[in-house]
Amino acid sequence: MSKFKYTETEQQFNNVLNHQSKELSSIKRPDMSSVEARISESEALLKELGISTEILPKVVNPEPQKVMVVPTWEELCIQAEQEVGSTTDLESLFTDEELRMNQVALRALNTDYNNIHKLDKIDITICAAAGILGAVVDILLIGIPQKTLDGLKGGPLSNYVRDWFNQRFPEKEMEKLANSKVSKVSFDAQDNRHTTEYVTGLSAYYHRLLSLGHDPILGLIFGVYDILTGKMTTIDKTGKIVSQVMENYADRKESDIFAAIAKQIIHFKSDITTSMGLPVPLMALFNLLQFGSIGEEEQTIAEIVQGMYYEGYDFIHFCSMSIPTMIIEVIIRLGYGIKRIKEGNAIKDSIPFSLNREKHPKLSTMLFIGHSAATAVNAGKVYFTKNPMAINYPQWIAFAKYSYKQLKWVLLEKPELRDAYVRGIIAEKLNEVYAEIDETFAEMSEQYIVVFN
């Protein structure tokens, strides 16, 4: 029994090939070795007599053209099944040596495809250098934010970013903006005085962490929705989701969605440089993680994240932490592009924006390795400092993104694309064979009257 499952059409091909192979083997061809020897003797004799073979008259015996009847595919299939049966296994048409050579050729094609995506020493050097540089910047220039008498302070680069935000959004201007009607929103309650349903932990310190409207990403959905409906949507300190109408803030509603979006953005602006600023993107969702027993105080994940926010792990710090991640992206993509150009590829084809593996077969893997190296260093930083404030959130997001892509590539996409590559090469070779068959048939059919059934 064959180890392959053939479709009906494939099985018909196998049967016809088997039948045709046996037909060819049954043809008795005359032994031409003695004839060739006689011809050679005759040519030698003519040469001795001084007679050139080129001036000998050619004898042409005109014969009437024969008729060649070409059967239909259905007729061929019926004839083949009558002669060889209907269960021909393709492997039975080859010798053991031919099967072995086929396997060698297939392995060679698979290797060729793997080599297209295999990183060389320069590729690995670019990845490693980018990852290490990003990690060094995170450790030495970003640092860990700490509360001081002069406000939140971290590494030199982190302080520069925070100072830039403070200069771009001055405290007095932001206070004036926060007190104006254009920035007042329904989800900005700082305690439970105006709530109808109690929100655990709602205070001046934590209201931006608990309210989904203050999240830089979720706020564009829930915040706008709350402004349109006059509600406040929160995830409190215990992980309870509460959505309630804020009657005391009814005058803060907007009926037009574009006005609501504009008010949402203005409110973001007014809060960005406050002492308890905007949380990092999606940080509010960590309030749902009411499990774990971490550290000496046996805190849950939610409690750890709430403490991080209180200590200054905010949106501005998120922007600072994004710099090492961006450095890794820029170095790897730039190095990849320069290397591709030096290898002779066109500049247009070397621009490393797309992660399409058909256009840039190595880029995604290089980014995965670079971010993996930086993430490993950051994990070590957190382990040795025993401080969750050392977590580089953007770096872990990048690592998760490229890990998913790499896993999907290795397990799902690569086998399929490699198979398509091998089948494509085989199809090209097969088309060459078909072309030779057509050419041979055309030459041979010149002597016949061809009739197609």
Image: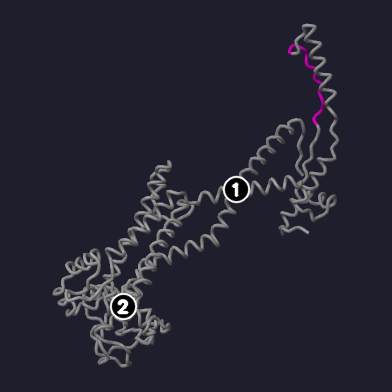
Predominant SS of the magenta segment: loop
Q: Do the residues under discs 2 and 1 have CB atoms within 8 angstroms?
A: no
Q: Is residue 174 left or right of residue 402?
A: left
Question: Residue flagged by tag 2: what amino acid is it?
Answer: Met
Give, as a single range, the part of the protein colored magenta: 54-65
Callout 2: 10 Å neighbours few (<14), some, many (20+)? some
Residue 109 in picture, x, y percent from top left: 60, 48
Element on which disc 2 rests? helix
Q: Is residue 263 visible?
A: no
The answer to which image quadrant residue 38 occupies is: top right
From mark 2 to mark 1, how far is it between C-alphas? 53 Å
Q: Which residue is mark 1?
A: 109
Mark 2 or 1, nearer chain start: 1
Tell me, for residue 308, which label it has, or none.
2
Residue 24 in picture, x, y percent from top left: 81, 40
Residue 277 in picture, x, y percent from top left: 25, 76
Q: Residue farthest to the front?
A: 384
Q: Residue at x 29, y 84 (%)?
A: 230
| Vertical relation: 323 (above or below) 383 | above
| 58 part of magenta stretch | yes
> Which quadrant is the N terminus positioned in?
bottom right
Q: Is residue 8 visible?
A: yes
Tell me, for residue 153, which label it has, or none.
none
Q: Residue at x 81, y 49 (%)?
A: 80
